[in-house]
Amino acid sequence: MKASEVRQLTVEELESKLKDLKAELFNLRFQLAINQLDNPMRISAVKKDIARIQTILRENELKDSANA
């Protein structure tokens, strides 16, 4: 997921996506622990997506507080 795609989502959609990604990361780590993980690079991709979403949420938060 690209940052430009993330910026187009609403706050509610971002929070929902963040929750889904955290659940996926948990499942990937669990699969890694029991040696059933097919694509280990997916873990780093999910971590980066989580970081992107958290960054966009924080930017929106700061932008809203600056406008208030």
Image (cartoon, rainbow, N blue to C red):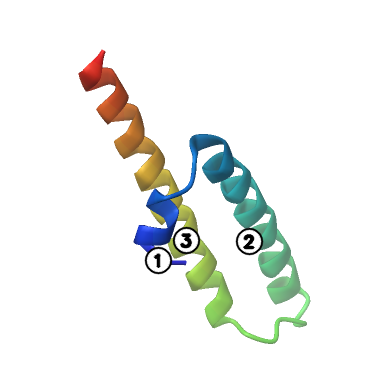
Kind of residue at badge 2: Leu
The residue to which callout 3 is attached is: 49
Q: Which is more foreground, mark 2 or mark 3?
A: 3
The answer to whether mark 1 and mark 3 are in CB contact below 8 A is no
Q: Is residue 26 above or below residue 67?
A: below
Residue 63's label in the rendered image is: none
Name the side, left or right, on which 13 lies relative to 8. Answer: right
* Residue positioned 30% across, 38% down in the render: 59
Determine which of the numbered discs, if any, sits on residue 2 in the image: 1
Disc 2 versus disc 3: distance between alpha carbons?
10 Å
Q: Which mark is residue 25?
A: 2
Q: Nearer the viewer, residue 7 or 57?
A: 7
Q: Position of residue 44 (x, y in %)?
A: 49, 71
Cα–Cα gap, marks 2 and 1: 18 Å
Label 3 secondary element? helix
Q: Is residue 50 left or right of residue 55?
A: right
Task: Specify the farthest residue to the top.
Answer: 68
- N-terminal-most mark, 2 or 1: 1
Query: Mark 2 touching mark 3, by CB under 8 A?
Result: no
Label 1, secondary structure: give it.
Answer: loop
